[in-house]
Amino acid sequence: MTHAHAPRPLFVLVLTAGLVTACGHGGADQEVTATSEPIPTTALTLADVPGATSQAAYRGIRVEVLCKRVETSIRNAALRSNPNHTVTVEHKVGDATVHETLALGLNTIWPNGRFAGIASDIAACDGTDEEVQFWSYGAPDSETGVLHATAGLPDALAGFTITTTGEDGAKHHIERIYAAVTTNNGEHPGIIVLTTVSSTDQPAALAPMDLLDTALQRANATLDPTAITTDIGTRATPHPTNTTGQG
């Protein structure tokens, strides 16, 4: 006997289409001509970033480093968050830009899977030539450079540096960390990404680590030191946000 198949619910089709779109580079949350959004209350303020003269919030990851699935891991995770997409707040600091990308309150059966994948991909890309797309500047102009994984970070952090060069000779130095966090007293897993981009081949005056403690405080988040190893469904126990080794 044959059985008729009922049509899929509309929300399933919409979610599937969104996931497929977001899997490629420059996913649906990236816009060539970006429209600014309200700045989240969980983000760094203008006063939190020394020397910052302006700030604006946008959808997506504004400087996208195409190392395996590092950036798509953030976008796909944010599809399950509220308000359903990744938000990056840009701060202009002289000739550099500070980016804070927020993907908080993730609702997924594998809370730490996204961060574990990011850490693994960064390790796999260490020492290899990678492409970078600068969505902050309108059209996604590409530059390339050798990615260097940052050694010695705590278990809740992963990161890298890369100095890129474009066909026109333009250079940028990018330093980025991904922080595995929890909010709501450890119940909600999330990821905060901090990035500094200078317009030369030298690091910006500010490093992402300089802003981490303040970013955690603004988001009311705590680092999750078990994010790489925690079993499926397990929630981490919050711990103090101080990352300086004191307390």
Image (cartoon, rainbow, N blue to C red):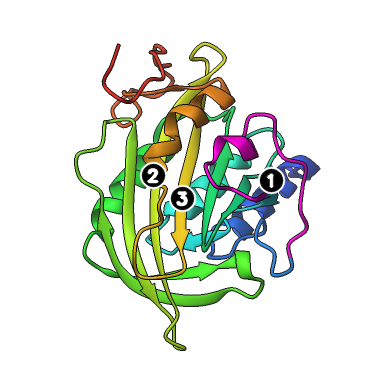
Q: Work out how far the residue at label 3 is from the one at label 2, CA to CA, in angstroms.
A: 7 Å
Q: Which residue is mark 1?
A: 15
Quarter of the view holding residue 110 = top left
The quarter of the rendered structure image containing the N terminus is: top right
| Residue 42 located within the stretch drawn in magenta | yes
Are the residues flagged by discs 3 and 2 in contact, CB closer than 8 Å? Answer: yes
Point out the stretch of residues depicted in magenta. Answer: 34-54
Label 1: which secondary element: helix
- The residue lying at 66 percent from left, 71 percent from top is 138
Q: Nearer the viewer, residue 65 or 114?
A: 65
x and y percentages locating residue 42 in the rendered image:
63, 29
Q: Residues within 10 Å of mark 3 (few under 14, many from 20)?
A: many
Label 2: which secondary element: strand
x and y percentages locating residue 193 in the rendered image:
48, 43
Q: Which residue is mark 2?
A: 177
Q: Amino acid at mark 2?
A: Ile
